[in-house]
Image: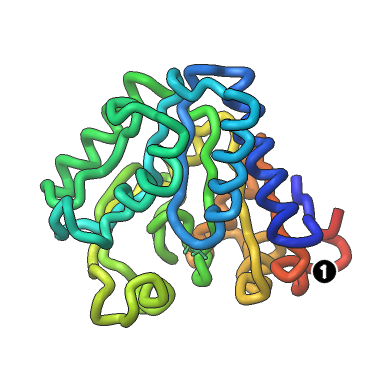
């Protein structure tokens, strides 16, 4: 289901409500959360509403969508530390309820450890995702099999370039990463894809209307039975009339 919101604030409001509905219905829900610019307003709103309404997050388990690998745990670029600052800490989620890839540890062992945790504790109740300029989900880069489980990978030039805006230059972007796989994410009970800004208009149109296949990882989502796409007006600009709600 595609919903077009008027602007990024409305998108944040709807996305925060969607996440809160999951927590209200399942106080011990497992929720996947992404890093990036797109979810920032949603996280701010989520914290605000949670404080106003005294939402109890103590039973919720958050799984990080992805992480760089081959950098130290205290490196400022560690994505899970960003998540901790922006959302895990402010919501009062305990450290042992935050399931995260360790950036400095062996990537194969890390991928297996996260899959093992999900196998024992899953399914994921809600996976919140952003959309990469190249159609990636997490760090499932173009060409990744739709059946992929958590894995390590080398970033594509497109992801290095888009991540450069976070760290002040391409040379500062780590070259390898860890991610939940598309196959892992597709087993989630519900998936919410958030897309904002005109820069994402073309890739959103390709994701919704283009050929389904690994070259645009987000096209995998089209076969998910419980998918919600929240896009703001700018991100929806390239969609054809048939796609619009
Ligand atoms: P963004 O990143 O939210 O910063 O645009 C999304 C992504 O690349 O997955």
Q: Is residue 222 left or right of residue 105?
A: right
Question: Dot 1, how many residues are within 10 Å of its Cα: few (below 14), some (14-19), or many (20+)?
Answer: few
Residue at coordinates 13% horizontally, 51% vertically from top-left? 104
In the rendered view of the protein, which quadrant contains the N terminus? Answer: top right
Vertically, is 53 above or below 192?
above
Q: Nearer the viewer, residue 66 or 45?
A: 45
Residue at coordinates 57% horizontally, 24% vertically from top-left? 55
Q: Nearer the viewer, residue 210 or 67?
A: 67
Q: Secondary structure at mark 1?
A: loop
Please tell me in which quadrant of the rendered image residue 6 appears.
bottom right
- Residue 148 at least partly seen: no
Residue at coordinates 57% horizontally, 31% vertically from top-left? 51
- Residue 194 at least partly seen: yes
Vertically, is 174 above or below 70?
below
Q: How many marks?
A: 1
Report the coloring of the rendering: rainbow
Residue placed furthest toward the front:
52
Residue 70 screen position, x and y as percent? 15, 59
Residue 2 screen position, x and y as percent? 76, 50
Q: Is residue 82 left or right of residue 87?
A: left
Please tell me in which quadrant of the rendered image residue 24 appears.
top right
Residue 96 screen position, x and y as percent? 28, 26
Q: Is residue 3 left or right of residue 204?
A: right
Ligand 1 within 8 Å, label 1 CB: no
Please tell me in which quadrant of the rendered image residue 50 appears.
top right
Q: Which residue is mark 1?
A: 240
Vertically, is 156 above or below 46?
below
Q: Nearer the viewer, residue 57 or 147?
A: 57
Q: Is residue 188 left or right of residue 181?
A: right
Residue at coordinates 46% horizontally, 27% vertically from top-left? 30
Residue 75 screen position, x and y as percent? 19, 59
């Amino acid at each position: 289901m595609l919903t077009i919101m008027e602007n990024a604030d409305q998108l944040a409001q709807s996305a925060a409500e969607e996440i809160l509905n999951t927590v209200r219905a399942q106080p011990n829900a497992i929720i996947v959360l992404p890093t990036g610019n797109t979810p920032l307003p949603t996280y701010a709103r989520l914290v605000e509403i949670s404080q106003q309404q005294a939402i109890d997050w103590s039973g919720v388990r958050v799984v990080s969508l992805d992480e760089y690998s081959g950098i130290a745990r205290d490196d400022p670029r560690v994505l899970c530390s960003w998540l901790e600052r922006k959302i895990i800490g402010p919501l009062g989620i305990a450290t042992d309820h935050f399931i995260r890839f360790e950036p400095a540890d062996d990537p194969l062992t890390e991928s297996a450890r996260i899959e093992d945790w999900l196998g024992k504790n899953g399914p994921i109740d809600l996976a919140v995702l952003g959309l990469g300029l190249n159609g990636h989900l997490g760090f499932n880069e173009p060409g990744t099999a739709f059946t992929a489980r958590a894995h390590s990978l080398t970033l594509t030039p497109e992801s290095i370039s888009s991540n450069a805006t976070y760290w002040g230059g391409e040379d500062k972007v780590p070259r390898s990463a860890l991610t939940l796989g598309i196959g892992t994410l597709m087993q989630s009970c519900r998936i919410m894809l958030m897309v904002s800004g005109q820069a994402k208009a073309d890739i959103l149109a390709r994701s919704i209307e283009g050929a389904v296949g690994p070259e645009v990882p987000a096209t995998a989502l089209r076969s998910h039975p419980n998918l919600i796409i929240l896009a703001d007006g700018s991100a929806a600009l390239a969609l054809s009339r048939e796609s619009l709600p």
